[in-house]
Image: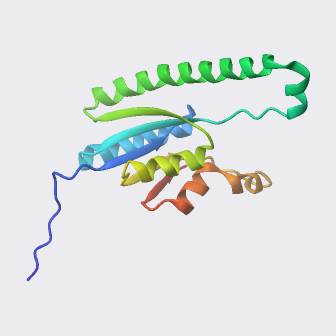
């Protein structure tokens, strides 16, 4: 007879992409439940997507647009740092080991790359339930792309 067991020393990692929305908070709450049950580490990730600027605007305004873009990204990064600090305190109060990261680029690509580079065991992320014509727009959603490409389980919280 072969004995089956679970290695309780194994470090489970749960990735929670968070964009500051109520749906991301719901996903985080669900991830905290899993983390407590599994003794897992939560990794909270926010992705700041590149702000595209049409070339014609760049030609007309010179470096002003580039500097404005840097300022916006810096502001977004500071916003995330403040939000992440609040979320880290909440998880600390719930005795959940957690860390946070701010990434830059295409959200779905960066989340997938982060999962692969950090041996993530589970992704828990929020997604809005869209109705009617809005569903068509959702075909390119981050949650859908991540769930299709991920090599680990993905829980999408509605």
Residue at 56%, 23% in the rendered image: 77
Q: Quadrant of residue 147?
A: bottom right
Query: In this rendering, would 48 be left or right of 14?
Result: right
Q: Is residue 106 above or below residue 97?
A: below
Residue 44 visible (yes or no): yes
The one nearer the camera, 16 or 11, is 11
Quadrant where the N terminus is found in the figure:
bottom left
The one nearer the camera, 36 or 11, is 11
Query: In this rendering, would 4 be left or right of 154?
Result: left
Specify the farthest residue to the bottom.
Answer: 1
Residue at 42%, 22% in the rendered image: 86
Query: In this rendering, would 49 be left or right of 81?
Result: right
Residue 74: percent from the left, percent from the top?
60, 20
Residue 150: percent from the left, percent from the top?
49, 59
Residue 136: percent from the left, percent from the top?
76, 57
Q: Is residue 2 above or below residue 77?
A: below
């Amino acid at each position: 007879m072969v004995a089956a067991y679970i290695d309780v020393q194994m470090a489970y990692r749960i990735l929670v992409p968070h964009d500051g929305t109520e749906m991301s908070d719901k996903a985080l709450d669900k991830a905290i439940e899993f983390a407590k049950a599994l003794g897992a580490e939560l990794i909270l990730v926010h992705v700041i997507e590149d702000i595209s600027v049409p070339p014609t605007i760049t030609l007309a305004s010179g470096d002003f647009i580039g500097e404005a873009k840097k300022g916006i990204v810096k502001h977004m990064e500071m916003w995330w740092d403040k939000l992440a600090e609040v979320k880290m305190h909440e998880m600390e109060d719930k005795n959940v080991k957690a860390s946070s990261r701010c990434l830059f680029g295409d959200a779905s690509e960066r989340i997938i790359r982060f999962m692969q580079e950090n041996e993530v065991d589970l992704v828990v992320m929020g997604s809005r339930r869209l109705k009617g014509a809005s569903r068509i727009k959702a075909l390119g959603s981050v949650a859908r792309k991540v769930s299709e490409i991920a090599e680990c389980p993905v829980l999408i919280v509605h």
